[in-house]
Amino acid sequence: MPERKRILFLFSDTGGGHRSAMEAIIEALNDRYPDRYESIPVDAFKDYAPPPLNRVPAAYPEMARHPRAWSLGYHAFDGPRRARAITTATWPYVKPAVRRLVEEQPADLIVSVHPLLTGPLLKALGSDRPPFIVVVTDLVSAHAAWYQRQVDLCLVPTEAARWRALEFGMRPDQVRVIGLPVARPFCMPGADRRAIRAELGWPDDRPMVLLVGGGEGMGPLYATARAIAGTGDHFGLAIVTGRNERLRAQLELVEWEVSAFIYGFERRMPMMMQAATLLVTKAGPGTIAEALNAGLPMVLYSRVPGQEDGNVAYVVTEGVGVWAPGPARTAAAVHAWLQSPDELDKAVAVARSVARPGAADEVAGIIHEFLAGRRSESDAMP
């Protein structure tokens, strides 16, 4: 049996669905090509970056709570020349760490699912390097740092992201639209909603609104939940606070006007999305893609300026959701959806039509093509 090829996955837990996209790809690789490839996930910031950059994953939730400062930083460096300038300026400081990563993590192929990791790694690897694939996890307004012309292939989730890649100087043959990889359990159009609700303990005689704030429970989740519950409609409300245990404790003390279910960090999100009637969420790309694959219409109540601006426009333009920032507007939008079941049904159909449930499998197939080709070449060598 030939030795397994090593695939290095570069990610970091800094929002943007980086980890979930990576895990979906690894899942697809293991399912399609069992025991053929060894997938190595590396959080390059946490495990290799020098201080204070190694604390970026832990600091991200607090950084994202300051939208004006975030927007200023995002737009200040959003351009091919500016993105390259940042890599050049920081290179003397990060060079030892990046070179250590390259030495300690040899690979037959590299997949980056984070925009800030690609440039430094390419610089450290030089011209004699393994194939390098970027999987963009921002739906539309992806930062210029994603689009490095030295990579072998750039896989993007939407046609709008493809045009942005071309605008930033990538060749058409380098860019391929494949959708955003999501875990297979989200992609089950024939799921039995009644059975899933019974397993979750949710009522089956009313609509269920699922309110989430990402893995960190970000955004004005408490005020939004209270406003939604106060609309007087006949529905159930499931609230997922992620790792925000303080918020979960606050919500558990509330005397709710509706049937309410409070959760912390949840691994049953595929079940919850399959069972819900309507999703209320911040405009994170991973959650949006998961909802589309689950056929779940959505109300977007907040966004991170810059990379998530395009996500809002995408959801609204496609007709799968609405933009309603602020608790009062969010509650009004939820009320309007629940009073319009025909519109909800229409949005469900549209969501399924624009979803790309085969994205993770497609990425796995592309990786296999690269590595199978290299194996054939090495076998042919005398």
Image: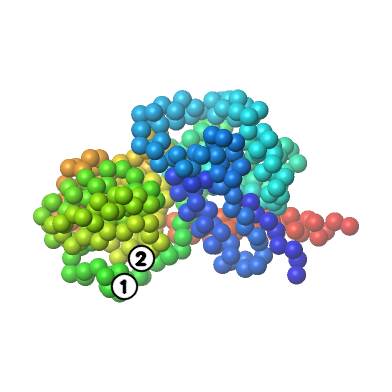
| Residue toward you, 18 or 296 | 18
Q: Quadrant of residue 311?
A: top left
Mark nearer the viewer, 2 or 1: 1
Label 2 close to label 1 by CB (< 8 Å) = yes
- Left or right: 185, with 241 as reference point: right
Near mark 2 (Cα within 10 A), the count class, few <14, some 14-19 or many ≥20, is some
For residue 275, which quarter of the picture?
bottom left
What is the x, y in percent for residue 63?
41, 36
* Residue 61 visible in rendering: yes
What x and y, as percent, mark residue 9?
A: 60, 51
User: What residue type is disc 1 on?
Assistant: Glu
Q: Which residue is at 21% across, 60% downward?
A: 260
Classify residue 182 as left or right of residue 279. right
In percent of the image, x 55 and y 39: which residue is there?
54
Farthest right residue in view = 382
| Residue 204, percent from left and from top | 21, 70
Three-letter residue code for mark 2? Met
Image mark for residue 320: none
For the point 15% across and 59% down, the residue is 258
Q: Which quadrant of the figure contains the C terminus?
A: bottom right
Mark linked to residue 271: 2
Q: Mark 2 or mark 1: name the one nearer the start of the chain.
A: 1
Q: Of 241 and 169, which appears nearest the observer?
A: 241
Pick whichever, 221 or 181, lies toward us: 221
Which numbered tag is attached to residue 199?
1
Q: Quadrant of the N terminus?
A: bottom right
Extreme residue toward the left, this view: 232
